[in-house]
Image: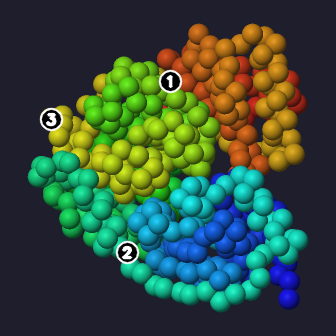
Amino acid sequence: MTFTHTFNPTSLREYDIRGIVGKSLTSEDAFAIGRTFGSVVIRHGGKTVVTGYDGRLSSPDLEDALVEGLVACGLNVVRVRCGPTPMLYFASVSLQADGAVMVTGSHNPADYNGFKMMLAGKPFFGPQIQELGVLAETGHAVPFARGTILGLDLRTDYVRRLLKDWDGGEKPLKVVWDNGNSAAGDVLQKLVAGLPGEHIVLNGGIDGHFPAHHPDPTVAKNLEQLIAEVRRQKADVGLAFDGDADRVGVVDDQGEILWGDQILILLARDVLKTHPGATIIADVKASQVLFDEVRKAGGKPLMWRTGHSLIKTKMAETGSPLAGEMSGHIFFADKWYGFDDALYAAVRLLGILARQDKPLSAIREALPRTVSTPEVRFDCDDTRKFKVIEEVAARLRHEGADVSEIDGVRVNTPDGWWLLRASNTQAVLVVRAEGPDEAALERLKQAVVAQLAQSGLSAPDFSGNNAGH
């Protein structure tokens, strides 16, 4: 009997498959992903796929259905069970698997879930994800065959590999970790047991209800508990994860947040000591300070499109040893495997701090100061959002503006820069701006508002606090 299935079109995203469980994402969808992705693996000559899942309540059932679909393609499926997404990536590399699928809702609300995929060690995204929809609709899955299933606990091996790159000696740092009830829970406990120093773990249990706070360390509100504990404990640093632990948040010894681009500056300075002249990649939302500091440290800064799959692909293309995004995805190809891993980034950052003779706050305070908006997101219909970007870009080109169109439009002016881009995953436009002072930032905001007005859109809500940077 021919297999056919129709996905909810909103679930097939740019970087992954994602939806609301029971509404736009079901167990039937999970089986269909197994059948279609498994067919792609088979047609690429593959035989083995590894699977894992995060701590969300719906994840075990979705992974069961996914595995059923993969096995029905005749594949050998290795299940590494519950853990962080980077552990699944590690399994893919260490087992030399032909494909990998992680069931995770990442940083989305608790009723969401999704699937991140790799094919032949590379991100599976964009048109490839759309292809799964076509395969399912047209019934072009491979004929039914019975594969095999193997369960494998890689947590100890993964932690051992993380610890192999510890380079901070025996300096006893005091570290507060906020697991955020994420899928890193069990792995994190093993990791801190192997590190020197004193480690306090908050919200260590894996809990898909996320009772403490939402698992997204890019939102300041979600770091309040960590900040309070760092200050109370007089700790050297605080670290936080998102729901599947592929994104890291950092708080210094004074309880001040370091954003993704600031974290990357510290890591880049260290990596460039052993890779002088190397290309360091950051996404288009990053501060100009980052690109300037990479250049000062002897590196070649490269601004690239937002999205973990896009960044990983560009790293492989350029041979970059390090990349990062404002969202807290940090990618190491220096000693590591080129994928985003919050636990590994944390180990490398702690190593740097252990070798420093000054606190993290002093390093942060020594960075050039700017004032920036948070990432402002506002609704814009999926059918309109990219058209708006085209209209704005055309006007800017006509005006002779200094503009980059790598991902949306990023405009440099004497006041600083502003960015307008369309989200690849939601029906929203995203605005960010950065200037040397509040007056300059206000002029940048007004430039954005004027452009949006010319495209018939209202001004976004800039009322969130401007961030010192």
Could you say which disc has been placed on residue 288 in the image? 1
Residue 371 in sight here: no
Quadrant in which the N terminus appears = bottom right
Q: Secondary structure at mark 3?
A: loop
Circle 3 is placed at which residue position? 357
User: Considering depth in this image, is 36 or 180 the residue closer to the camera?
Assistant: 36
Q: Quadrant of residue 233?
A: bottom left
Give the alpha-carbon distance from disc 2 to disc 3, as whole Å: 36 Å
Q: Which residue sits at x=49%, y=48%?
A: 329
User: Considering depth in this image, is 185 or 160 the residue closer to the camera?
Assistant: 160
Q: Which residue sits at x=38%, y=70%?
A: 185
Categorize mark 1 by other alpha carbons within 10 Å: few (<14), some (14-19), many (20+): some
Tell me the amino acid under the disc marked 1.
Answer: Gln
Q: Quadrant of residue 369?
A: top left
Give the alpha-carbon distance from disc 1 to disc 2, as whole Å: 40 Å
Q: Which residue sits at x=48%, y=85%?
A: 150
Mark whose residue sits in front, 2 or 3: 2
Categorize mark 2 by other alpha carbons within 10 Å: few (<14), some (14-19), many (20+): some
Where is residue 239? Give x, y as percent. 35, 53
In the rendered view, would you say 358 is above or below 449?
below
Q: Which is nearer the N-term, disc 1 or disc 2?
A: 2
Q: Are marks 2 and 3 in contact (CB under 8 Å)?
A: no
User: Considering depth in this image, is 145 or 126 the residue closer to the camera?
Assistant: 145
Mark whose residue sits in front, 1 or 2: 2
Q: Which is nearer the N-term, disc 2 or disc 3?
A: 2
Circle 2 is placed at which residue position? 154
Tell me the amino acid under the disc marked 2.
Answer: Leu
Where is residue 51? Give x, y as percent. 54, 74
